[in-house]
């Protein structure tokens, strides 16, 4: 099984790489080759980790540093005819809003070139799993959204993701590729430091106090978000490669089963798990720009389709926080 990952140097890309190697197979086939593409070199998995792959299988890892929106770079990666492609490369929300041209190039043009490359090579059976976002929704929305709710994004990042979704749906309809688009909830708790995403505060709000550091809350306590833990997202990416094509129905695009939480409930869970001293590390400093972006994202979804296909969400915030603490302790 040859698997290609774009955005392989990023947080999700690295987690997915580790999960693939730990599992050693995908779609019932032994993992034999990994192509890891990003603008910088993705970390090479430790040799010891590769022992999880079946002993009879030699795992070839190709690391490519290049422009995801460069057709020649993509052609090099597609030359090995990957059977599964995970398209995770993206310019995230705040950065895409600040630089329209960059966001279009990475979030949309690269997707179009990737699809064209698959079509040109006849990779009609290749499963292309793209990470989309809750940001694809927006505007005047019902209280609870379904997967078929019209996409009217209110930011450039969401617009670029929505455009990519439509293109993957059409290429799949034409039989040029076998697409699957997973709309990701906001991911919490991410390890490391804050990134350029408008939703980055959601992880910082919990991560920093859990580590004994101060955190800034830039949004109102009543603001609601739709969230999912990193481990559930990675499990969903693996599952996305395995769903039978006939089971998708009319649309290849759907929302993963996150949970709806308010900032107030996040802070309450932080207090429950880490105590009053952790909560005291959170300082409220309103940021209208962040509030406007994140506040335009819906927070309540009907995720029956994802659940019927076998995707699983987190039970509650306490499960998410305890999972982060366990992972941090074992890091």
Image (cartoon, rainbow, N blue to C red):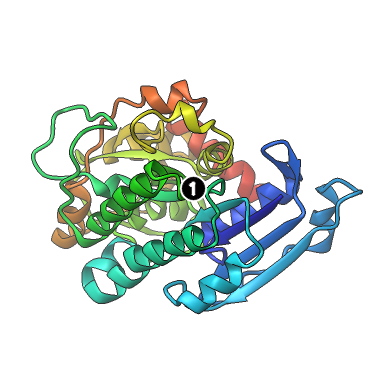
Task: Name the residue nearer the viewer: 155 or 179.
Answer: 179
The x and y percentages for residue 273 are 49, 36
Is residue 318 among the parts visible in the rendering? yes
Q: Could you classify mark 1 by the number of other residues whose Cα lies within 10 Å: few (under 14), some (14-19), or many (20 or more)?
A: many
The x and y percentages for residue 90 are 40, 63
| SS at mark 1 in the image | strand
Q: Quadrant of the C terminus?
A: bottom right
The x and y percentages for residue 242 are 59, 35
Please name the residue shown 79% across and 55% down the image: 49
The x and y percentages for residue 167 are 32, 52
Please name the residue shown 47% across and 47% down the image: 189
Picture layout, residue 193 above or below residue 12: below
Please name the residue shown 26% across and 31% down the image: 300
Residue ranking furthest to the right: 56
Residue marked by disc 1: 129
Task: Name the residue nearer the viewer: 271 or 288.
Answer: 288
Please name the residue shown 16% across and 62% down the image: 289
Is residue 313 among the parts visible in the rendering? no
Residue ranking furthest to the left: 140
Quadrant in the rendering for residue 150: top left
Total marks shown come to: 1
Task: Name the residue nearer the viewer: 81 or 11.
Answer: 81
Residue 327 left/right relative to 118: right
């Amino acid at each position: 099984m040859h698997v290609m990952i774009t955005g392989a140097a990023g947080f999700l890309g690295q987690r997915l790489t580790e999960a693939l190697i730990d599992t050693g197979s995908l779609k019932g086939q032994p993992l034999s080759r990994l192509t890891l593409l990003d603008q910088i070199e993705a970390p090479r998995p430790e040799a010891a980790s590769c022992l999880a792959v079946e002993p009879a299988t030699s795992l070839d890892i190709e690391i490519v540093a290049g422009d995801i929106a460069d057709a020649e770079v993509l052609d090099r990666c597609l030359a090995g005819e990957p059977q599964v492609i995970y398209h995770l490369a993206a310019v995230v929300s705040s950065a895409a809003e600040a630089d329209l041209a960059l966001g279009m190039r990475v979030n949309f043009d690269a997707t179009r070139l990737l699809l064209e490359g698959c079509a040109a090579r006849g990779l009609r059976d290749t499963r292309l799993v793209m990470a989309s976002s809750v940001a694809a929704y927006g505007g005047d929305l019902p209280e609870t959204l379904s997967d078929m709710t019209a996409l009217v994004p209110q930011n450039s990042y969401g617009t670029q993701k929505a455009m990519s979704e439509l293109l993957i749906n059409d290429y799949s309809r034409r039989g040029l590729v076998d697409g699957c688009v997973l709309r990701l909830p906001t991911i919490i708790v991410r390890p490391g430091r804050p990134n350029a995403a408008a939703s980055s505060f959601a992880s910082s709000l919990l991560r920093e106090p859990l580590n004994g550091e101060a955190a800034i809350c830039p949004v109102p306590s009543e603001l609601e978000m739709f969230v999912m833990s990193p481990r559930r997202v990675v499990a969903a990416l693996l599952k996305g490669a395995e769903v039978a094509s006939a089971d998708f129905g009319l649309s290849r695009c759907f929302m993963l089963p996150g949970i709806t939480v308010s900032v107030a409930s996040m802070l309450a869970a932080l207090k429950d798990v880490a105590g009053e001293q952790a909560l005291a590390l959170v300082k409220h400093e309103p940021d209208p720009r962040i509030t406007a972006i994140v506040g335009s994202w819906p927070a309540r979804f009907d995720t029956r389709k994802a659940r019927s296909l076998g995707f699983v969400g987190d039970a509650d915030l306490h499960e998410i926080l305890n999972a982060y603490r366990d992972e941090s302790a074992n890091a």
